[in-house]
Image: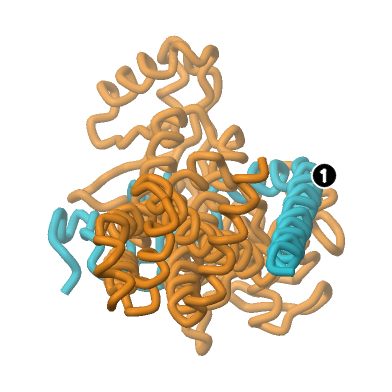
Chain colours: A orange, B cyan
Amino acid sequence: MREAFSTLDHCLGAVARRRVRALSLGTATALATFACASALFVTGALREESLRALDAMPDLTVSRLRGGRPALVSVREGEGLRAIPGVVDVRPRVWGYVPAEGTGSILTVVGWDGAPLSGIVRGRSPATGSRGWCVLGGAVSRMLGAIPGDAVELRGTSLRVVGVFDDRVALRTADVVLASPDDARAVLEMSPDEAADLAVTISAPEERALAAHRIADALPWARVVDRSVWRRTVVLTWGRRGGVSLLLLVPSLVALLVLALDRMTALDARTRREVGTLRALGWSVPEVMRAEVITAGIIAVGGFAAGVLGAYGYVFPLGAPWLRRVVLGWSAQLPDLSLTPAITLADVVTLAMLALGPQLGASVFAAWLAARQDPLDALRS
Amino acid sequence: MRRRAFGALIACASLALLGAVIDARGRVRARERDDALHRASARAVGPELALRAPSRVARHPTRAEPGAAMSEGPSIPDADPSGAGSFAP
């Protein structure tokens, strides 16, 4: 114990004596860790958020591809799917996009299928079967300056705002205009027999794949999206986006490695004398190496901790300004980002390997270079 | 003296870490409290997040183009059928 404290004392002294080097290395480590951790934290939180509500997705989503592009489906053709074994329900869905004139942004118009809205809408919920109303997403409401009671006009269709989606659900509703299916069709210029896609409910999860094949056989134009497949797609796409962000940071990690190697292997006269004194006092090569590695570890771990804590504060309490534009996309009306941390042990280990690995590797090499000097030569230098 | 300063530094870092853990737990609990709201909103307007690119308009990637909402970005391969496999200029 006493020996451990003495070694720690020596290492802390070494950090204090080489304070400029310690400060530069610690700052570089903190910055590199901060950049990597921010990207990982944002993409991890968004991946989990994307996965959480996937249960609300239909078992199968059937859309039409025409010339390789999504096209409208016929409601009548969809009715025929009910005859396929395992299919319990087929629901046509009306949704699409319209530009908000003069604002440069695009609204998502969704036809309401009667799903309960209580608790998520400020204002009143619409009555089933009624027309002429709309519920706006928070970002749309702010952009149009419309509140409940106001009238908005979309593509020649006048709608009365009856409510605004609560900001707590802005991650899904920020750019939405919810209207009755008939009004949504009018805004989106769809005929009464047309829908954007078909939501298919299957009797048992194990029949999903078989039903998807049967639907694809029955409707050669159909693209069938299985919910379980989409779950995998979400994980992969967010992983890819996080991976691309990390890839962009590779130069900074390489720079950190070069800096660490340069700083640690450039033995100045003072360090040489220090190591020579230790060797002359009877410290063995492994003992000198251990002390040098601990010294480097104090600097690296300090910088790493500062970087991780800084990234947490930047991503969660501050909402990742700037980075959100890169990771989220280029929308004109992104929702306010209120993310829930989803930091796993694997994330921390990955960060530690990226930020600490190169430095500790360099420190072992530098320690070996320092320790193998002849003590007399080192003292003379 | 040096050891005391180091101890104080460790204590500060531990406090900051504790603060982050408490904040994270608070956020997770708040999210759990609002879980019913998030599920209701997903049922009403779809489960996808309101993230999209105005150039490709892919608010509902499951219903439009696979992965489109997340495949837009500098130097990311273009998954759009009009330019499958090619890189953005």
**Chain letter belonging to callout 1:** B
**Residue A208's x, y, as percent?**
43, 18
Dot 1: few (<14), some (14–19), or many (≥20) neighbours within 10 Å?
few
Q: Residue at x 60, y 46 (%)?
A: A4
- For badge 1, the amino acid type reads Arg
**Residue A344's x, y, as percent?**
56, 41
| Of A352 and A321, the residue lying toward us | A352
Q: Residue at x 50, y 27 (%)?
A: A59
Q: Is residue A47 left or right of residue A118?
A: left
Q: Secondary structure at mark 1?
A: helix
The residue at which mark 1 appears reads as: B33
Please say whether residue A66 is visible from this viewpoint. yes
| Of A189 and A340, the residue lying toward us | A340
Q: Residue at x 54, y 56 (%)?
A: A41
| Of B28 and B36, the residue lying toward us | B28
Q: Is residue A346 left or right of residue A166?
A: left
Quarter of the figure with residue A173: bottom right
Relative to A43, residue A322 above or below: below
In the rendered view of the protein, which quadrant contains the N terminus of chain A?
top right
| Of A367 and A60, the residue lying toward us | A367
Relative to A62, residue B49 above or below: below
In the rendered view of the protein, which quadrant contains the C terminus of chain A?
bottom left
Relative to A91, residue A123 above or below: below
**Residue A34's x, y, as percent?**
50, 66
